[in-house]
């Protein structure tokens, strides 16, 4: 066999091995990024309903990334943001079919209030997280504590199911 | 060297030392298991958080470190735990959970520095921070919590631990919440929570800068705990004890009734009532639950009813509907989880006499007599159920003492022997039964009234006066003004003139005094209650009675019927929505509520407000007020807000778990509001809003208009608009009540 060809084959094989190993290694880290299209629910102009905006999410934790995208607000100028400025997710975990999201107290302190305002905030989160497989409910915590309400209207003492009527 | 130069150098040195010192105090010392490893970890500060060199930390932890430069990511692996973090992100991923740490990872001098307390927590270290010495102390947990689960019959919570560390229970103001703190403890990796469900929620927390594990148990209902012996150690676990529950009431073939609980039962207080014949057992510290009931065919008991008669203290009430002339008695029981009742054999009565100012007689079986006094002439009646008198027992005992003149014995009916003591005046009595020998029970009845105690009880809506006397007394309650006072006069002949401690003034009672005097030749004991304000009082006890109970209303007189509870949203530190020009929702809500209350009162409705001023009232409290007062309807008034200033209109909410009357009420109010105010009709909506969800009566929450909308904000500042809103809502309410007329 021609030495040159032999060398070439060896090089190709090694290159394939290296790329393969790198691929396996990187995908194993779980950071090698999962990209996924998710539905984010934002408020409509009249605060009557929620409307979805599709967005690509890259990240390690879909639930967290989805909520972080909600916090960023909509790109569509006809939609309204649903989560107050300064809000941060302190902890997010899955417990059976329930996602438990723990927010800092800015979600309360910087909230604009109103039953409608609160309702839109709560269901923008619940309906967004409710789209994920095997998730049926969302439970809210503030600074690690159970709460009866966010800003004085909604009952948050029990986990909430998505409200499909709000996001037609 | 010149002086000038020297001073400059000195100043320079001082500044240098000063900055060095501040830098030094800013960087904390770090100890792991008592060993100072500050130098090795090279701590730095970034955004106030302490970060340490990742390589050194991994080395100390004996963890594996992997740097993925392409994606700016660092992985730290130890055993089955991998922590992934990215430069500049405060979020770290631990296996499948993501948490936020105190600071993002930073790169300095080609080294990654990672958030110190966050990472050490993840790897199971407990951290204590000492402010004074600016030192962190890290420990490995000394005990692990393996599982939280229910004890047998859900009667206790078991915290399974590998060994018990110092612990303490923290009772909170919230009866639905319990906190247990365990020192230097942690959750085991595969910790199991077998407690959280729709009624219970278990969570754990670290107290910042302390190596203490905090466990929080929240329940939907008040936790049935006995605050004395809540927590204890048992088999190396911690046990949080709940009160026992009733599990069954069964008629046994051998002819007895067995009441069974899943824990030990206290001695019940027993009373008998006639017409229909009932036996009432009040059992302290026992809870109602689903229980098995089987009465079979029996000739003693027709039916059994069980209710949670009282909380705080907890009392379970069991009412046995007895057949005519039948009688049961509690039998002593070895098994502390059981109460056994047996039909009573007819007992023989003998040896009736009067000695040491006491009526004394004997029976050959335990007997619970029914004692009461009658007037004109004054006499004490002792009914002994299911008994017969010894043949040679005398019919009469003549005494002619001060109080007791004569004792007569007769038969009341085929089952009951009646002993009557003729008295010179009505007096209290105390009955006692003592087992003398196997078949001899000695009964003694002592005569005379005395004050047991006087207590004041301050509640939401009433201040209660309770005067407890050992026997029934005749009394009169009078109200005087200038200053407001309520006077209780008790016929003095009926009570011994002894002193009694008066309680601390409370609620609207600001002072008390007691005196004894003669009125129309009668001796009277008078108790005066001076009041700070007066609205109305209600004598709840009978006359005569042994427990005089007077309720003093603390606000407008409340009638249970047609009571409307109106709730002004928010208040106190919670302003609700705030408009661009600083109009606060809580203020507008209260304005509308006060107008509405006036209109409804003028139309003859009873109205109660959950808040009358700018004070904070929790959602839970608002619900409690409406439920406790048994309101016919509940109206919550709010004003709306949204992120866009174009959102507008009026809407009314009802709870999804209610419909019918709530929906009707909401529709009536919404219709009137739209007609009157001419704002956009957002309709009647269903939503899980707290106050309308947990109130037990038809309930609506009205969002009158949007404070975030400039046009509507202007309207809400206008008095006429406020009045018109209140008028419209009142019309809706009247319209709703009209539906129930004839
Ligand atoms: Zn409100």
Image (cartoon, coloured by chain):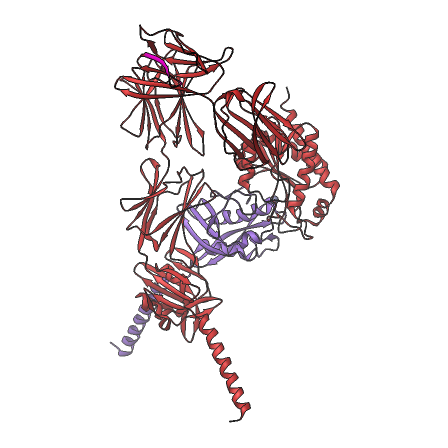
**Residue B272 in view:** yes
Chain shown in red: B
Say how many tags the image has.
0
A74 relative to B205 in the view: left or right: right
In front here: B99 or B434? B434
x, y percent for residue A164: 52, 42
State the residue lying farthest toward the left: A1
- In terms of secondary structure, what is the magenta stretch mainly? strand
In front here: B288 or B60? B288
Where's ligand 1: which quadrant? top right
Q: Which residues are magenta?
A: B350-357
Give the image quarter of residue B306: top left
Give the image quarter of residue A48: top right
Q: Is residue A25 above or below residue B206?
A: below
Q: Is residue B457 above or below residue B98?
A: above
In front here: A49 or B109? B109
x, y percent for residue B299: 34, 12
x, y percent for residue B196: 39, 43
Chain shown in purple: A
Q: Is residue B67 above or below residue B275?
A: below
x, y percent for residue A7: 28, 76
State the residue lying farthest toward the bottom: B1
């Amino acid at each position: 066999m021609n030495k040159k060809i032999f060398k070439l084959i060896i090089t190709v094989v090694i290159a394939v091995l290296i790329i393969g190993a790198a691929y396996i290694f990187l995908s194993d880290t779980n950071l090698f990024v999962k990209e996924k299209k998710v539905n984010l629910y934002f408020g409509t102009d009249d605060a009557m309903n929620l409307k979805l905006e599709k967005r690509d999410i890259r990240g390690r934790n879909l639930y967290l990334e989805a909520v972080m995208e909600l916090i960023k607000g909509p790109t569509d100028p006809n939609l309204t943001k649903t989560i107050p400025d300064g809000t941060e997710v302190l902890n997010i975990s899955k417990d059976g079919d329930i996602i438990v999201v723990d927010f800092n107290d800015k979600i309360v302190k910087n909230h604009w209030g109103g039953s409608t305002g609160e309702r839109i905030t709560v269901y923008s989160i619940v309906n967004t997280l409710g789209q994920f497989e095997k998730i049926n409910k969302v439970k809210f915590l503030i600074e690690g504590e159970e709460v009866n309400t966010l800003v004085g209207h909604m009952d948050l003492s029990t986990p909430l199911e998505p409200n499909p009527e709000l996001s037609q | 060297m010149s002086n000038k130069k020297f001073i400059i150098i000195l100043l320079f040195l001082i500044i240098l030392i000063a900055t060095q010192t501040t830098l030094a105090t800013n960087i904390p010392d770090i100890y792991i298991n008592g060993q100072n490893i500050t130098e090795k970890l090279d701590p730095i500060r970034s955004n106030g958080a302490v970060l340490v060199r990742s390589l050194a930390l991994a080395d100390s932890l004996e963890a594996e470190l992997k740097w993925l430069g392409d994606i700016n990511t660092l992985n730290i692996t130890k055993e089955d735990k991998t922590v992934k973090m990215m430069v500049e992100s405060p979020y770290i991923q631990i296996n499948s959970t993501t948490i936020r740490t105190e600071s993002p990872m930073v790169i300095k001098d080609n080294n990654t520095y990672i958030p110190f307390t966050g990472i050490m927590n993840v790897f199971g270290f407990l951290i204590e921070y000492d402010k004074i010495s600016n030192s962190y102390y890290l420990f490995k947990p000394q005990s692990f919590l393996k599982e939280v689960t229910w004890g047998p019959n859900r009667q206790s919570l078991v915290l399974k631990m590998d060994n018990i560390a110092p612990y303490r229970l923290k009772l909170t103001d919230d009866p639905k919440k319990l906190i247990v703190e365990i020192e230097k403890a942690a959750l085991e990796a595969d910790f199991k929570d077998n407690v959280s469900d729709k009624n219970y929620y278990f969570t754990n927390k670290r107290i910042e800068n302390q190596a203490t594990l905090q466990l929080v148990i929240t329940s939907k209902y008040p936790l049935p705990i006995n605050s004395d012996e809540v927590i204890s150690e048992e088999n190396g676990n911690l046990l949080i004890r709940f009160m026992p529950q009733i599990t069954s009431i069964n008629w046994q073939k051998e002819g007895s009734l067995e009441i069974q609980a899943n824990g030990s039962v206290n001695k019940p207080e027993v009373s008998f009532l006639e017409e229909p014949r009932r036996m009432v057992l009040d059992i302290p510290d026992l809870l109602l639950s689903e229980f098995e009931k089987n009465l079979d065919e029996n000739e003693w008991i027709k039916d059994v009813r069980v209710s949670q008669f009282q909380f705080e203290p907890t009392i379970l009430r069991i009412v046995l509907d007895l057949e005519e002339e039948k009688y049961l008695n509690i039998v002593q029981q070895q098994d502390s989880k059981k109460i056994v009742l047996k039909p009573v054999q007819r007992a023989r009565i003998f040896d009736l006499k009067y000695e040491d100012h006491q009526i004394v007689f004997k029976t050959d079986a335990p007997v619970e007599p029914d004692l009461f006094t009658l007037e004109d002439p004054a006499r004490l009646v002792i009914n002994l159920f299911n008994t017969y008198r010894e043949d040679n027992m005398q019919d009469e005992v003549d005494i002619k003492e001060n109080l007791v003149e004569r004792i007569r014995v007769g038969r009341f009916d085929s089952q009951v022997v009646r002993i009557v003591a003729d008295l010179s005046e009505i007096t209290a009595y105390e009955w006692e039964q003592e087992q003398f020998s196997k078949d001899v029970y000695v009964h003694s009845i002592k005569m005379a009234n005395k004050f047991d105690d006087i207590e004041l009880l301050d509640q939401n809506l009433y201040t209660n006066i309770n005067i407890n006397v050992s026997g029934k007394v005749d009394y009169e309650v009078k109200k005087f003004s200038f200053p407001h006072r309520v006077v209780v006069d008790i016929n003095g002949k009926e009570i011994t003139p002894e002193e009694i401690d008066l309680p601390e003034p409370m609620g609207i009672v600001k002072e008390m005094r007691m005196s004894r005097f003669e009125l129309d030749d009668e001796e009277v004991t008078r108790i005066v209650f001076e009041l700070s304000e007066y609205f109305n009082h209600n004598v709840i006890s009978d006359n005569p009675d042994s427990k005089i109970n007077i309720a003093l209303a603390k606000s407008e007189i409340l009638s249970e019927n047609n009571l409307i509870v109106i709730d002004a949203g928010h208040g106190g530190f919670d302003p609700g929505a705030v408009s661009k020009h600083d109009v606060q929702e809580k203020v507008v809500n209260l304005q509308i509520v006060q107008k509405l209350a006036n209109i409804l009162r003028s139309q003859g409705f009873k109205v109660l407000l959950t808040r009358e001023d700018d004070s904070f009232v929790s959602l839970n409290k608002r619900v409690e007020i409406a439920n406790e007062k048994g309101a016919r309807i509940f109206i919550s008034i709010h004003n709306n807000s949204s992120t866009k200033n174009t959102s507008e209109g009026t809407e009314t909410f009802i709870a999804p778990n209610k419909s019918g009357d709530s929906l009707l009420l909401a529709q009536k109010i919404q219709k009137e509001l739209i007609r009157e105010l001419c704002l956009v009709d957002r309709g009647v909506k269903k939503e899980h809003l707290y106050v309308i969800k947990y109130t037990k009566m038809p309930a609506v929450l009205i969002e009158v208009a949007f404070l975030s909308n400039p046009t509507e904000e202007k309207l809400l500042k206008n008095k006429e608009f406020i009045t018109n809103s209140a008028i419209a809502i009142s019309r809706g309410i009247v319209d709703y009540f009209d539906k129930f007329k004839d």
